[in-house]
């Protein structure tokens, strides 16, 4: 037994050593590449998706760690990401398209899966939409100028909106504009019909040729009325409504003054009525372009007794500089607010540096103006006369026309109440009292007609 044992053991040992040595690797061990997998495997049935689509993937590396992924939609241009998913916005060029996606895992040694995971993703085109911007509703009545602002959206990406199409009064004749335009101002030569009810339509078209629903302004079945332009003068009523007798007197004064020389040759706009309902919500360009319809604007307001009756300086400042640049001219008559917080910036359309901090409480009946420029008539305060009067402190470029003759403690050099921006052919004549309250002797009408006819050169 001992002999047999000694023979068998060496044989088994040799056999074991031979087998072990035969399995030892020879040379350098070959690196194994990572593998990549998509959440949806190839040949899976994928229903058409919207162009905004989320794709998920993962990777496995048998001898290391996956540090990220490279993905592509054309197998030529690749993007690296450490994430396991991403949401893509696929831009299509037709009503529907199919995209192929590739993704390869990258391990911690930089080795890339040479056989990317890939799949096809069918997508369908979503139609765009367009909505008018809130707060830009067209007034019930306008002159033949109208501005419209809108915002277009598209689930496939707002940049896929290629065109907007607009129409006036019917949807048989559409006009196309580029998709990067979101504001339009239309006039009579655009198709606006004066002395008639009008309606505006808009729709969006995307790069695939799909259209949004048609939107209209005004909405529902409503329309807006377009008042025809009459003459070269626009009379703007900025008078407050809390004292009907006062405002009616002002309206009568200006209408009578214009009728006496410009009968049926001026248009009228009330911007205080119905809390400013006649003021376009899109001030620029709509209100500015409305002013440009006229060669001359007569803008009259009250004495500035309270917030409700203060002149609309904000509207004037936003629009009149553009109106002047187009050659427009204005006579502006008003009082200043009781409290003037922003000295030097209360108006930007006349050469006024600031106004006096004190107020002349009342101007007695038949107080005559001091005429400081030739060829203007003397004015006399009426009943009621101006009150709460502030003097104008004008800057270089301003030329005084009238002062009020008050003694100290009021400095007469600072009680200028009417100026113009040039000695001859001015663009602006500004009066810091309501002109209709300076007509006791009837000369306010003569003064206004001189400003329009001589200073501004406006004739019938």
Image (cartoon, rainbow, N blue to C red):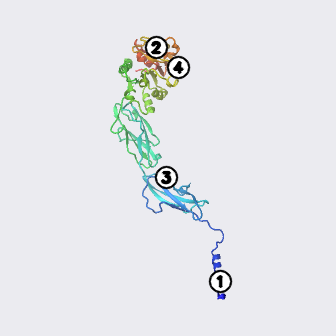
Query: Nearer the observer, disc 3 or disc 2?
Result: 3
Q: CA distance from mark 4 to mark 2?
A: 19 Å
Q: Nearer the viewer, residue 144 or 113?
A: 113
Q: Position of residue 103 (x, y in %)?
A: 53, 58
Residue 137 visible in the picture: yes
Q: Are marks 1 and 2 in contact (CB under 8 Å)?
A: no
Q: CA distance from mark 4 to mark 1?
A: 124 Å
Q: Earlier in the sequence, mark 1 or mark 2?
A: 1
Answer left or right for 178 relative to 216: right
Q: Position of residue 4 (x, y in %)?
A: 65, 88
Q: Residue at x 44, y 59 (%)?
A: 46
Q: CA distance from mark 3 to mark 4?
A: 62 Å
Residue under circle 4?
Answer: 394
Q: Which mark is residue 246?
A: none
Assign a secondary structure to mark 1. Answer: helix
Q: Which mark is residue 9?
A: 1
Q: Residues within 10 Å of mark 1 (few under 14, many from 20)?
A: few
Q: Are marks 4 and 2 in contact (CB under 8 Å)?
A: no
Residue under circle 2?
Answer: 376
Q: CA distance from mark 1 to mark 3?
A: 69 Å
Query: Nearer the observer, disc 1 or disc 3?
Result: 1
Q: Earlier in the sequence, mark 3 or mark 4?
A: 3
State how many labels appear.
4
Q: CA distance from mark 3 to mark 2?
A: 74 Å
Assign a secondary structure to mark 3. Answer: strand
Q: Are marks 3 and 2 in contact (CB under 8 Å)?
A: no
């Amino acid at each position: 037994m001992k002999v047999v044992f000694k023979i068998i053991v060496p044989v088994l040992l040799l056999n074991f050593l031979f087998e072990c040595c035969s399995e030892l690797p020879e040379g350098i061990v070959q690196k194994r590449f990572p593998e990549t997998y998509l959440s949806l495997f190839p040949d899976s049935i994928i229903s058409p998706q919207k162009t905004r689509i989320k794709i998920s993937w993962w990777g496995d590396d048998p001898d290391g760690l996956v540090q990220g992924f490279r993905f592509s939609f054309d197998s030529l241009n690749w993007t690296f990401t450490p994430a396991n998913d991403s949401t893509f916005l696929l831009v299509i060029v037709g009503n529907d398209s199919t995209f192929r996606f590739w993704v390869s895992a990258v391990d911690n040694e930089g080795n890339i899966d040479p056989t990317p995971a890939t799949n096809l993703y069918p997508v369908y085109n979503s139609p765009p939409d367009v909505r008018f911007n809130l707060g830009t509703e067209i007034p019930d009545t306008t002159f033949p100028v109208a501005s419209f602002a809108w915002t277009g959206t598209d689930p496939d990406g707002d940049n896929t909106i290629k065109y907007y199409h607009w129409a006036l009064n019917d949807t048989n004749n559409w006009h196309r504009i580029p998709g990067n335009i979101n504001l339009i101002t239309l006039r009579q030569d655009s198709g606006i019909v004066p002395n008639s009810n009008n309606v505006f339509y808009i729709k969006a078209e995307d790069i695939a040729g799909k259209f949004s629903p048609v939107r209209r302004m005004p909405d529902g079945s409503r329309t807006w009325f377009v008042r025809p332009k009459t003459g070269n003068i626009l009379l703007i009523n900025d008078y407050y409504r809390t004292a009907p007798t006062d405002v009616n007197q002002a309206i009568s004064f200006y209408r009578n003054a214009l009728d006496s020389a410009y009968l049926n040759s001026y248009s009228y706009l009330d911007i205080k009525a119905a809390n400013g309902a006649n003021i376009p919500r899109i001030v620029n360009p709509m209100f500015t372009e409305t002013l440009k319809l006229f060669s001359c604007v007569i803008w009259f307001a009250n004495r500035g007794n309270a917030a409700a009756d203060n002149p609309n300086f904000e509207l004037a400042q936003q629009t009149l500089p553009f109106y002047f640049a187009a050659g427009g001219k204005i006579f502006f008559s008003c009082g200043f607010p009781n409290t003037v917080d922003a000295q030097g910036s209360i108006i930007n359309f006349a050469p006024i540096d600031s106004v006096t901090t004190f107020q002349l409480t009342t101007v007695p009946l038949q107080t005559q103006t001091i005429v400081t420029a030739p060829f203007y008539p003397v004015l006399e305060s009426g009943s009621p006369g101006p009150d709460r009067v502030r003097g104008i402190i004008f800057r270089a470029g301003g030329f005084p026309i009238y002062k009020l003759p008050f003694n100290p403690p009021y400095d007469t050099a600072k009680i200028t109440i009417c100026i113009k921006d040039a000695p001859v052919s001015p663009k602006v004549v500004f009066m810091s009292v309501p002109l209709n309250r300076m007509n006791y002797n009837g000369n306010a009408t003569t003064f206004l007609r001189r400003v329009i006819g001589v200073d501004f050169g406006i004739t019938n």
